[in-house]
Image (cartoon, helix red, strand yellow):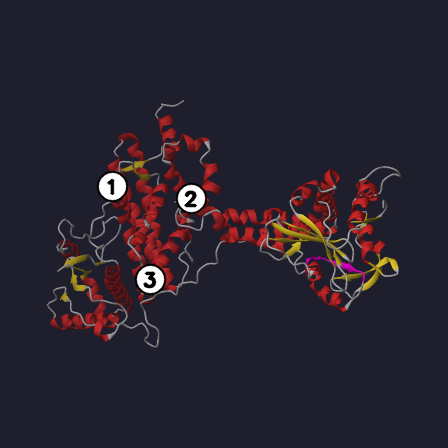
Amino acid sequence: MQGENQHHIPQMLQRGFSIRGRKNETWYFEKGAVPESKDIAEIGAGSYFYAGPTAEGEPNLDASMTSFESGPFSKVLNRLKGLSVGAAPSSEDAVAVIAHLTGRAAFVRDVFSRGIAQLAKGALEIFSDPSVLRQHVGLDADEPNEKFREKVLKSFLERDEVKASDIPTSVVERIAFAAARENFARIAADAGPAVAAYAERMIAGAPDAIREGHNRGLESDFQGLERQRQLQPLAWTIEAAPSEGLLLPDCVAVGVEEGGDPLPYLTAAPQRLASVAMPLNSKLLLVGRAPGSPAVDWSDFNRHAAACSDAFFIASTDDASLVELHELIGARSFSAIEQGLQEAFSDFRGPPPPEARPQAAPVPDDEGEGMIPPELQEFSYTFWGPGWSDEAATAKLIDEVKGIVAGIARIMPLQRLEGIAFSYDYAGVLAAVDRGVPGVAPPSTVAPEIGVGIAMTPLVRRDGVVKARVVMTGWLAEALIGDDEAAQRFALHAFVRQLAIVAHVQIFDTRLPGVLLTPLTDPLTRRLYPQVSAAIDGYFVARTAASFAPDDTLSTHQQLSVEALRRATDLITRQRLIYRFTGKLDELLAVALPCIQRVLEAIGDLLGLADGMERDPLVDAPELAAALQAAGLRDWLTFFRDDLRQMYERLGEWESFDEFLAFSRHVERVAWQFGLVPWRTDEGGVYVKVPEGTDAVVLEAAARAVGLLG
């Protein structure tokens, strides 16, 4: 009735579960409490549950429902209660009672408030975890995928400036993907506090929001017409109660989905509803069954109803069996919503990550595990000394080289070592190397403007087998047998690096035969992959030989990377401006591609060394961090490092050469930063776009300087 104490489970229903001889009392079984007899006026009610205080006679939701229930509804409920076991009530009466009574209960508010709170907590957990969010938008892959296209790229492609570009969509996609991946951590970090605040507001406001929504729904339809429509197909019967009598759960009715366990009726999926049951009183159970669905046995209704109750149930007796069942309260009241939330969140979280692959390392531990078997250490190689007249020094050098090679051969496969040469005419010896493959030019040392070459290990083919020849400058031989410890360690490190290349050649060619010294056929791959190939090799070599590196090697490679970045920025920018006036793309590429190759090679070397030393490549290197930032490559560095690490950790387990060719994306990435956008044409050729916007500011300033612009 209207007033402050407003019942969400009507007293007219509760009285059907009153204690014999005490019309207004029932046994109250509350979760976590001792069962007690209680006045029905105090059960299933709340202070102003539906409506606040109003002037006398002024209508509100509680008054409307009271009027409805004391009029036509009470007649329907009493008509059902008057039926005997086995009777078939009219569908109209059955659906009217269940639809109205289940929809008005506090159970609706309590369970769905918890659902909103759990949703908010789950969302906070997800959106606070960058790796989960990255997976959700498709940024956990190496290449653009359907998730990224749907959730990120679709709206980006609709922007006017993107539509106006003549760059193919596939290339725009790759550029956008790289930008999104590299900037994601910063975006996620910036969004984190806002997400947390929003989730907290959702959790705090859930009860009020649900109450308002529940009331609005009841005001528009407290009879539950939509639920009546869903229940209409069921066939109805009246079934008997167990000997202890039926209990009334706070969810009022229990439903069963096809093939599932009983759930609170309101949380069951209507389209899969196989049966529904509601106690009319302690003696009669109203049951509906969907035609064609497997038979549902309601003989254990009390157990299911207790588990589906959220906070309490009532009964006409405190039978021991009911006292035992009250421990089940809450077991299933939230399960359907919880399962739905877990399924929804699983779409975000994705499958659990695979177990981390153990890191492969060619260096053995103290017990000697990982040593190359003695039978595989047997090999021969040629040796050319620097041509000293001092026979004793030459003999010492030979012994030193033999010792180093024998020692390294115990931990790395060196069977592909063709020969070792020291020469003061380092460039001349390199140029004279016969590669053994028609059309493959002899190797050459680095350009003078980049540095001074001291060691190289070019590949050769001998009797169909790919081998490697180590060539080093003559002064490294002096350092190896000299008394200067710093110079000796430098020379040893340089030598071990070359032997590591030999090992890499053997591991690679054994796993992926027929690749080395074979020309690439795809035009775009032929343009891009050679620029990053040396970086992959450099990472492997630097990481493998890191334990032999002098203490200052990391800082040296940091500085080499700075110089490579600055040189690339200076030379490519200058040549790109010249291109604006000459249109000679080949001249631009002739400058740009070697610069990009040097950047990748220098950074690959640095990253391999840092990982081998277990150091941060940017530690104590503000100059390098600034150079990367200035070049727009600071965030890219992380992804380049991750890819190199994964390649190294799959040492000898690679599935195909495509894993290496995929590194061409890093050439593209660096090229984009320097204003070059290459792609494969429909005809199979290569096109390189040099967007005008890259140099717009400089070109405008130049035009103003010569009076072409006002």
Q: Are the residues flagged by discs 1 and 2 in contact, CB closer than 8 Å?
A: no
Amino acid on which disc 2 is placed: Phe
Q: Is residue 511 above or below residue 186?
A: below
Q: Is residue 334 left or right of residue 470?
A: right
Q: Helix, strand, or loop for circle 1?
A: helix
Q: Helix, strand, or loop for circle 2?
A: helix
**Mark positioned earlier in the residue sequence (1 or 3):** 3
* Residue 311 colored in magenta in the image: yes
* Circle 3 Cα neighbour tier, 10 Å, few/some/many (<14 / 14–19 / ≥20): many
Q: Is residue 524 above or below residue 517?
A: above
Residues rendered magenta in the picture: 307-316
Report the disc number at residue 590. 1
Report the disc number at residue 356. none
Amino acid on which disc 1 is placed: Ala
| Residue with the most extreme left position | 389
Q: Are the residues flagged by discs 3 and 2 in contact, CB closer than 8 Å?
A: no
Q: Mark 3 or 2, which is nearer the eye? A: 2
Check disc 2 and report the residue beneath it.
Answer: 177
- Residue 652 picture location, percent across and down: 30, 62
Q: Is residue 636 above or below residue 587?
A: below
- Residue 341 picture location, percent across and down: 59, 52
Q: Name the foreground residue: 605 vs 94.
A: 94
Check disc 3 and report the residue beneath it.
Answer: 543
In the picture, the quarter occupied by the C terminus is: top left
